[in-house]
Image: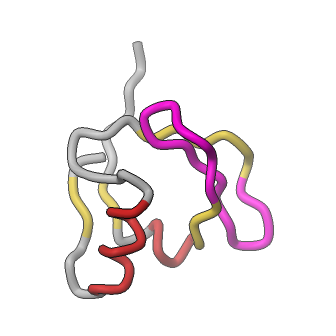
């Protein structure tokens, strides 16, 4: 993850609780379903994130 739009303090608190911060490795663990992305941060337990919230996050692809 590179950055997140900081317009929504509630989203920022949620992402912080999930350990999602700049430099974190984010992995999509399931295909999107019903507007939800199932992701893992730094290999942790997967959680659901709404697509609308995900649009506020900038990531960089790791194509190794």
In percent of width and height, residue 7 lies at: 23, 86
Residue 2 horizontal side relative to residue 10, left or right: left
In percent of width and height, residue 14 lies at: 41, 72
Residue 39 horizontal side relative to residue 16, left or right: right
Look at 21% across and 57% down and name the residue there. 3
Within the magenta stretch, is there residue 39? yes
Question: For residue 12, what is the image quadrant?
Answer: bottom left
Which of the image's four quarters has the C terminus?
top left
Look at 41% across and 20% down and name the residue there. 63
Vertical arrangement, residue 20 with respect to residue 24, above or below: below
State which region is magenta.
Answer: 32-47
In percent of width and height, residue 39 lies at: 58, 48
Within the magenta stretch, is there residue 41? yes
Closest to the observer, 16 or 2: 16
Closest to the observer, 17 or 38: 17
Look at 35% across and 53% down and name the residue there. 20
């Amino acid at each position: 993850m590179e950055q997140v739009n900081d317009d929504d303090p509630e989203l920022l608190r949620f992402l912080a609780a999930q350990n999602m911060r700049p430099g974190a490795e984010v992995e999509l663990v399931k295909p999107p379903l019903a507007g939800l992305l199932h992701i893992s941060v730094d290999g942790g337990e997967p959680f659901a994130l709404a697509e609308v919230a995900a649009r506020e996050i900038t990531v960089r692809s790791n194509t190794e």
